[in-house]
Image (cartoon, rainbow, N blue to C red):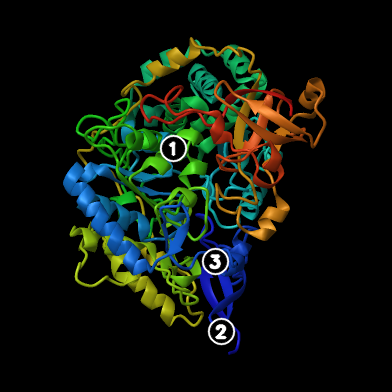
C-alpha cells in the first residue's frame, strides 16, 4: 500500500499539538508537525515525536493479562478479563458497599477525551465517593481556590493581550500545559510577546528556560513563595497601586488582607524569600503598573507545603489588580468542548460555588474530603490499607502509575499489593502494572478518535480539533471508555452523563459518548467530526470564530463580590509568618523540575528519550558540590527525615545555593544504588503522606523537601 499522510493532534501531553502522521499498511511510520496549522506552525516537541515508538515498540502490551497464583501473568482475552473484573466487583459491592470500589485517572487518562467523563459516570453509577485524578497529586489548591474567593464570569486576561506576566514556579517552555501561556509553540509565543513589549517576571529557585528571558528573575527559596507574594502585596497596598475602582465595586475582605500583609515588609519578605528587596519592589510595581496581565503558578509551589496559601495570594494579586476581561472583550479561553468550565460570560463576580466542606463526601482518613468532584489522592493508599466500613477493596487505575507518581512510595506499593482486586489499564509493564491482578491492554492515541478538550483552558481561539483514528488498534486492545462501559454492564449499573444516560444495551460509539460528555458546548463533538471530515485538508483543526464568546454586561442587580477574607484566609498568612522553618541538619531543599524528555512517569519506555536522559540527575549549584567535596557526575545518597535515595550529582550554576533540583516521578520502589544510572532515583520515596500536608487539600510536601547529601 502507498504511504498515506493523515492529520491529527499529539496526545503525549496536554498541549494537543497539530500533527501529520504517515501511515503504511496500518502502521505508524513517522510523525511531524502540521505547518499549515495556524496556531502550531509545525511545532512539536521531542516527546511528541516518539509517537511511532509509542505504538510500535515490541514491549507494548496488546493483550490483557491476569496474575497467576505463582505471581506470573498469563494472557487473557480482554472481553473475558472485563467480564471477570465486572462480576468480581459486583460481588465486592454487594458484600462491602459501593465505596469499596475506587477509580483513579492518571496523567495519560486526560489524553483520552472520553475517559474522565466516563470514569466519573462509572463511579457515580456504582455509587462510590472514591473517584481520583492526578490533579490532587500535584495541584489540588487550584481546585480549592477556583471558586472559594469568587470567580470573574468574564475570565482572566489573555496572554496574547497582556502587558505583564508573572510565572511562579512554572516553566511553560518545557511543560507546555503549566498555565499562563497558550500551549501552541510556547517558546515562539513567549518571544513574540516579548517583542511586542510584554514584561516578564519569573519566580523560581533556579534560572529555568523562562527565567533566562525574564525582565525580573526572583530566585525564591523553595517553599517561601508566600513571603514573596505577601511582600509584593505589601508594596501594592502601601503605594496604592491596586485598581481602587474595581476593588471598591467588586471586592470584600480587603482590609483584612491588607492587615495580614502589613508585617511582611519588603525587608522582611525579601529576607524570608531569599530575594533582593529592590527586585521584589520592582516586581510589585511592574505587575501592578501594567494594564493587563496575570500571575500564574506551577506544580512546584503547590507541592512545597504552602500550596493553598500560595494560590490564595496569587488570586489576591490578580483580583486587586483587576486582571479580568471586561464587557465587550473576547473571552480569553472560549472552551469549545468544556461547557461546565464555561457558563455565562458577564462582567461580574459569579455566585460562590462551594467545592469542598459541608455536604461533601469525606474520606475515612484525617477528615479530608472531596475537592470539586474528586477525593484527594493522599488518602487513597490508606483507604485501601485501613480495615473497616468503606475500605477500598477494588481499585481501577487508568492512564496512571500510582507507585511512581504518588507520595509515600513504599506505602503505595503495599496498598497496590494488598488490594483485593487491582486493575491496571496500561500498555506497558509499568511499576504499577507489576502489582496488578488484571492488566487491561488499551488502544493508544493514534488508534482512536478524540477531541482536544484537555487543551481548551489555554487555547485563546475557538479552536476545535476532532481526530479520527490513524490506524486500527492492534491485537486485543480496546479504548478505555469502552472498558468502563463493559465493566458497568457486567456490574449492572447505568452510566449517566451531562447529556443523559448512555445505552447499556450496546456500547455507544466515541462521538456519541463525547456529545454526552460535552452537552452544552460551543460545538458538539459530532459536529466538529463531520466538519473536519468535510475539509479539503481532511482532519485539520477548525476555528469557529463566529462562536467565540464575548463578555456581556453585568446583570442590573448583580451584587456578588470577591471575598478575600473567606475561610482560613488570610489568617493562614499570619501563621506562616510566625513559623520560620528550622534546618535541623537537613541543609538542602530538594525541588521538583520538569524535563524535556519526560512527562511525569511517561517516557521511560521510549529508547530515544532514555538515550537523551537515562537517569534522574540531581542538579546542584557548583559551589555546593565543591563545599560538600562531591565531584560532578558522582553517585550520591540523598537523605530526608524519612528515607534515602541515590542520584547522580550534576553541576548547574542556574540552581540557587542550598537547592537540589530533580525530576518528579522517576524510578520505582525497587530503584537503588546499583541501577541509579538506568532507573534514576524516585523523590517520592523521600516523603510520607500522613505528616506535613496541607490540612485542606491533604497534599503532601513533594517539593522543597528537607534533605542532606553524602557521597555514596
Q: Is residue 294 visible?
A: yes
Q: Cα distance, mark 2 to mark 3? A: 23 Å
Q: Cα distance, mark 3 to mark 1? A: 41 Å
Q: Secondary structure at mark 1?
A: helix
Q: Position of residue 391 (x, y in %)?
A: 27, 37
* Rendered image: mark on residue 18: 3
Q: Position of residue 203 (x, y in %)?
A: 61, 31
Q: 593 or 82, which is in the foreground? A: 82
Return the disc, 2 or 1, that comes first in the chain's sequence.
2
Closer mark to the observer between disc 2 and disc 1: 1
Q: Which residue is mark 1?
A: 414
Q: Secondary structure at mark 3?
A: strand
Q: 59 or 683, which is in the foreground? A: 59
Q: Which residue is mark 2?
A: 25
User: Who's the residue at 31% across and 23% down the image?
Assistant: 567
Q: Quadrant of the C terminus?
A: top right
Q: Secondary structure at mark 2?
A: loop
Closer mark to the observer between disc 3 and disc 1: 1
Q: Residue furthest bottom?
A: 1
Return the disc, 2 or 3, that comes first in the chain's sequence.
3
Amino acid at each position: 500500500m502507498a504511504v498515506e499522510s493523515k492529520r491529527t493532534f499529539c496526545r503525549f501531553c496536554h498541549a494537543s499539538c497539530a500533527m501529520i502522521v504517515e501511515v503504511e499498511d496500518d502502521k505508524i511510520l513517522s510523525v511531524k508537525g502540521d505547518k499549515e496549522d495556524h496556531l502550531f506552525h509545525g511545532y512539536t516537541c521531542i516527546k511528541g515525536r516518539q509517537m511511532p515508538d509509542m505504538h510500535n515498540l515490541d514491549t507494548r502490551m496488546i493483550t490483557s493479562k491476569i496474575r497467576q497464583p505463582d505471581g506470573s501473568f498469563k494472557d487473557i482475552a480482554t472481553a473475558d478479563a472485563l467480564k471477570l473484573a465486572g462480576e468480581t466487583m459486583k460481588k465486592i459491592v454487594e458484600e462491602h458497599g459501593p465505596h469499596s470500589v475506587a477509580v483513579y485517572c492518571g496523567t495519560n487518562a486526560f489524553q483520552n477525551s472520553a475517559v474522565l467523563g466516563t470514569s466519573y459516570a462509572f463511579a457515580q453509577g456504582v455509587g462510590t465517593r472514591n473517584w481520583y485524578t492526578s490533579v490532587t497529586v500535584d495541584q489540588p489548591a487550584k481546585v480549592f481556590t477556583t471558586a472559594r474567593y469568587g470567580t470573574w464570569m468574564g475570565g482572566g486576561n489573555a496572554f496574547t493581550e497582556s502587558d505583564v506576566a508573572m510565572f511562579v514556579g512554572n516553566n511553560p517552555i518545557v511543560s507546555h500545559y503549566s498555565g499562563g501561556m497558550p500551549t501552541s509553540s510556547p517558546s515562539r509565543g513567549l518571544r513574540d510577546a516579548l517583542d511586542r513589549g510584554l514584561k516578564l517576571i519569573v519566580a523560581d529557585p533556579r534560572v529555568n528556560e523562562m527565567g533566562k528571558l525574564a525582565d525580573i528573575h526572583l530566585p525564591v527559596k523553595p517553599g517561601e513563595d508566600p513571603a514573596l507574594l505577601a511582600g509584593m502585596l505589601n508594596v501594592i497596598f502601601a503605594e496604592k497601586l491596586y485598581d481602587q475602582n474595581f476593588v471598591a465595586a467588586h471586592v470584600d475582605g480587603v482590609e483584612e488582607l491588607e492587615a495580614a500583609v502589613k508585617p511582611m515588609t519588603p525587608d522582611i519578605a525579601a529576607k524570608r524569600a531569599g530575594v533582593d528587596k529592590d527586585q521584589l519592589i520592582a516586581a510589585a510595581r511592574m505587575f501592578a503598573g501594567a494594564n493587563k496581565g496575570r500571575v500564574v503558578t506551577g506544580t512546584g509551589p503547590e507541592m512545597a507545603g504552602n500550596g493553598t496559601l500560595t494560590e490564595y495570594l496569587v488570586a489576591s494579586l490578580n483580583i486587586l489588580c483587576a486582571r479580568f476581561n471586561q464587557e465587550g472583550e473576547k473571552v480569553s479561553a472560549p472552551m469549545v468542548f468544556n461547557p461546565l468550565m464555561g457558563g455565562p460570560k458577564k462582567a461580574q463576580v459569579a455566585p460562590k460555588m462551594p467545592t469542598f466542606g459541608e455536604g461533601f463526601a469525606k474520606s475515612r482518613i484525617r477528615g479530608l474530603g472531596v475537592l470539586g468532584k474528586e477525593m484527594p489522592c493522599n488518602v487513597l493508599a490508606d483507604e485501601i490499607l485501613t480495615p473497616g466500613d468503606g475500605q477500598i477493596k477494588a481499585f481501577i487505575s487508568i492512564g496512571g502509575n500510582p507507585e511512581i507518581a504518588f507520595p509515600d512510595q513504599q506505602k503505595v506499593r503495599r496498598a497496590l499489593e494488598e488490594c483485593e482486586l487491582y486493575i491496571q489499564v496500561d500498555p506497558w509493564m509499568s511499576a504499577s502494572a507489576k502489582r496488578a491482578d488484571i492488566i487491561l491492554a488499551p488502544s493508544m492515541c493514534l488508534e482512536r478518535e478524540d477531541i482536544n478538550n484537555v487543551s481548551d483552558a489555554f487555547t485563546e481561539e475557538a479552536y476545535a480539533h476532532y481526530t479520527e483514528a490513524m490506524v486500527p488498534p492492534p491485537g486485543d486492545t480496546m479504548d478505555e471508555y469502552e472498558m468502563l462501559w463493559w465493566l458497568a454492564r457486567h456490574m449492572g449499573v447505568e452510566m449517566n452523563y451531562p447529556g443523559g444516560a448512555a445505552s447499556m444495551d450496546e456500547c455507544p460509539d466515541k462521538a456519541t459518548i463525547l456529545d454526552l460528555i460535552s452537552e452544552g458546548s460551543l460545538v458538539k463533538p459530532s459536529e466538529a467530526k463531520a466538519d473536519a471530515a468535510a475539509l479539503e485538508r481532511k482532519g485539520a483543526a477548525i476555528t469557529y470564530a463566529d462562536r467565540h464568546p464575548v463578555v456581556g454586561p453585568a446583570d442590573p442587580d448583580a451584587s456578588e463580590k470577591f471575598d478575600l477574607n473567606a475561610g482560613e484566609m488570610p489568617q493562614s498568612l499570619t501563621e506562616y509568618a510566625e513559623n520560620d522553618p528550622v534546618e535541623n541538619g537537613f541543609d538542602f531543599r530538594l525541588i521538583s523540575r520538569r524535563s524535556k524528555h519526560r512527562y511525569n512517569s511517561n517516557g521511560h519506555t521510549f529508547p530515544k528519550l532514555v538515550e537523551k536522559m537515562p537517569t534522574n540527575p540531581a542538579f546542584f549549584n557548583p559551589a555546593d558540590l565543591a563545599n560538600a567535596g562531591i565531584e560532578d557526575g558522582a553517585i550520591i545518597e540523598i537523605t530526608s527525615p524519612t528515607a534515602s535515595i541515590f542520584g547522580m550529582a550534576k553541576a548547574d550554576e542556574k540552581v540557587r545555593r542550598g537547592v537540589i533540583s530533580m525530576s518528579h516521578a522517576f524510578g520505582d520502589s525497587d530503584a537503588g544504588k546499583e541501577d541509579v544510572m538506568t532507573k534514576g532515583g524516585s523523590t517520592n520515596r523521600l516523603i510520607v503522606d500522613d505528616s506535613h500536608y496541607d490540612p485542606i487539600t491533604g497534599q503532601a510536601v513533594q517539593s522543597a523537601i528537607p534533605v542532606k547529601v553524602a557521597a555514596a
